[in-house]
Image: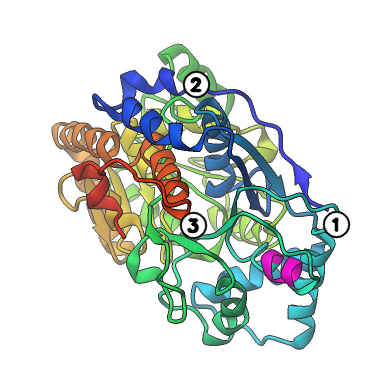
Amino acid sequence: MLTTVGVAPRELERYRSSVREGVIEAIREDAAKLQGARVLHINATAYGGGVAEILHSMVPLMRDIGLQCDWKVLTGSDEFFNVTKAMHNALQGTDHPWKPSDRETWVNQNRLNTEGWQDYDYVFVHDPQPAPLLYILRDHGMNPGGHWVWRCHIDLTNAQQQAWDLLRPFVEEYDGSIWTMRQYVREGVPERHLKIAPPAIDPLSHKNDAISDLQIQAVLDRYGVDRHRPIISQVSRFDPWKDPLGVIEAYRVVKRELPELQLILVGSMAHDDPEGWEWYEKVVRRAGEDWDIHVLTNMNGVGNIEVNAFQYASDVVIQKSTREGFGLVVAEAMWKGKPVVGGKVGGIPLQIIDGETGYLVDSIEECAARTMELLRDGQERRRMGEQGREHVRDNFLITRYLHDYVRMMCELSGEPVSEPTLAEEAVGGE
């Protein structure tokens, strides 16, 4: 059955110093129409990856504005998570030879998770792993109440057709859907209550809050990183779409001209990502005996505070993705005043204004060239970093994302909502 995730309390009022004037009041005004509503978020894992990270902030903030909000995760076998990882990759463009037993594993594990089901007023189901839940409940005559919304965090523009054909019948069951970008929406998705809402970061989380120089130095000392030499970093899961091997190659190009350069590659190993260890091993082998490449994970004791320190210490942050639903780490680095060199894919161009808050690149050579430019020009790094922080303040903080969900619930219930700000309209919209 579904497992409840515990979260630490958060107060919306504490975000006032991070956001523009009037933001807190607008959220509370719309949330007042939903007081006491029972809300449930369902996803595949309580840690590792952007969805879990967001929910650790979103759920307690929903509670703070008067909603009875819970978060539950799927219970699943290794076989189940192998199938759902294959589906995740196929929806991003990998060709996978689907067998009837794959669908059976996926659906049957979801069926087991419906045991002891209790109704909510609003249910948000995140990504493909738990997508069959609503269909299964209805198919078994349980007729769950409330409004059901499917939230897709994946870039489906190059999805394998067979994978989408497996997923689509379940998505069509929902009352509404939320997408990161309009171009991700596939054919057959109902237009009713379809909302565009890119994800966002929590500026007060351990991963993004201000950190002292002493704390930064302590983390760097612990992992053998020299703060007096140039540092570049990438923080992401170890998988082919984040192109960690390409990051190493770009680093080596730059290092030929800047021998003092150091690279930090940080990844979180999540239990719903069996492919992660395979890619971690590939990265370690590619790094070889270059002691200036630091390959680190949560298994080395790297958590949110350490990631925060690494990003603050970096001169340039890289996110060289070849597929990317959004890429929260881009906004995280920009919030810390760091220019980002990112792949020109998915939601990254929403965040990086090319030449203003960082650079968008298509190749290892271009990534290396732009990184070199920034490492050589401290004034440009600072200018881009400052503009990036304000871009995130206006568009990609958790307060905006919370308001998106509140508006969605109001619309599903026929309640009027406040008008979005110009910044909210710029990143979202119907």
Q: Which mark is residue 115?
A: 1
- Residue 359: give x, y in percent of width and height: 23, 52
3D distance between C-alphas at marks 2 and 3: 36 Å
Q: Secondary structure at mark 3?
A: helix
The label nearer to you, 2 versus 1, is 1
Q: Nearer the viewer, residue 430 or 261?
A: 430
- Residue 181: give x, y in percent of width and height: 35, 62
Mark 3 crowdedness (10 Å alpha carbons): few <14, some 14-19, many ≥20:
many
Q: Nearer the viewer, residue 73 or 102?
A: 73
Q: Residue at x 42, y 19 (%)?
A: 13
Q: Amino acid at mark 2?
A: Glu
Q: Is residue 236 above or below residue 136?
A: above
Q: Amino acid at mark 1?
A: Glu
Magenta residues: mostly which secondary structure?
A: helix
Q: Nearer the viewer, residue 370 or 203?
A: 203
The residue carrying mark 3 is 244
